[in-house]
Image (cartoon, helix red, strand yellow):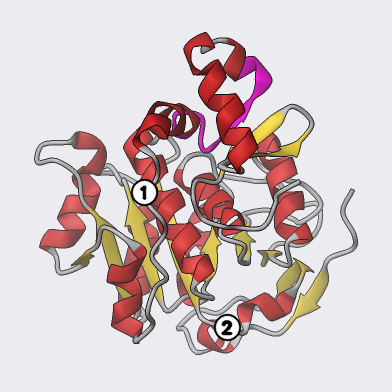
Amino acid sequence: MWSTPQSILNPKPLSVTSAPPNKLFCLGNAASLLGPCIAIVGTRRPTGYGLKVAFEIARDLARSGVCVVSGLARGIDGAAHVGALAGGGQTVAVLGHGLDRIYPKEHQRLALRILEMGGALLSEFEVGVAPLPAHFPQRNRIIAGLSLGVVVVEAAERSGSLITAGFAADEGREVFVVPSRAGDTSFAGSHRLIQDGAKLVNRAADILVEFGVKVEEPLPSFSEMEPLERFFWSHGGVASLSHLHNAPRLKERFREALSTGEVREYALQKFVWIGKTGAPRVN
């Protein structure tokens, strides 16, 4: 399924950090790292709100020519990669293991789609190295080092995303945080970052203005599609026919969304929420 990873030089933003990797291996298009990169990270157990915001920010960053960097983990990372693809842009996944495997396994199709759409998979670990827990904090410094800034979406009090944000701050990169309601424990770490001086953001335009880039605003979704959109975000932006079979009330909305291109099939019996983005077909 995968070709042989190639060893590449550290991209300039990463090479000037305090602890760049000795080696960096790549599958896919290493040139995707030459343009501006923004990282999006967050919890592996997100709320529907967190998934929706991560997808929309990634989609709009990609539509504005920004490469979205994340870690291919469940939850927010996956939504960020899917959002970037839906925006017709490039996305890079930094892995905490060798490039001969994909973790988690359910993201194998997503990893392949990243490569097909001109993105890349990166790792400092040799082929054959397993996804051990100690590897992921190391992986996080690379995510931060590749990027102009890091967007934290939904981080609890103890979250690996805070490690990534810490690396970014230490290297003089911007840290952006999406807030939630006061007292929301799933965002406790996010709110602490804001208290510590991170920049509060709600959309891609809030991020891009910091770098002098104008974001192309998406067209508003039709209100009658909101239940279907929420349903997709409860499944990370991607739903299978078996998921939809358990939601019979959404059957007509699903057919309508397929006809308008708001939902598109990207694998056998699997569908991705696109919305009114005008993004190219994902199939």
* Separation (CA) of disc 2 from disc 1: 23 Å
Frontmost residue, 144 versus 257:
257
Q: Amino acid at mark 2?
A: Gly
Frontmost residue, 1 versus 61:
61
Label 2: which residue? Answer: 35
Q: Are marks 2 and 1 in contact (CB under 8 Å)?
A: no
Does 234 lie within the magenta span?
Answer: yes
Does 157 lie within the magenta span?
Answer: no
Pointer 1: residues within 10 angstroms few (<14), some, or many (20+)? many
Q: Can residue 40 be seen from the camera position used here?
A: yes
Say which residue appears at 31% left-offset and 46% top-offset.
154
User: Where in the figure is residue 248, as x and y percent of width and height?
Assistant: 53, 10
**Which residues make up the magenta segment?**
233-243
Q: Can residue 143 be seen from the camera position used here?
A: no
- Provide the secondary structure element on which disc 1 rests: helix
User: Where in the figure is residue 174, as x and y percent of width and height?
Assistant: 31, 76
- Does residue 216 sit above or below 126 in this rendering? below
Task: Please tell me in which quadrant of the rendered image residue 88 appears.
Answer: bottom right
Residue 53, label in figure: 1
User: Where in the figure is residue 79, as x and y percent of width and height?
Assistant: 50, 46
Pointer 2: residues within 10 angstroms few (<14), some, or many (20+)? few
- Does residue 3 sit above or below 272 in this rendering? below
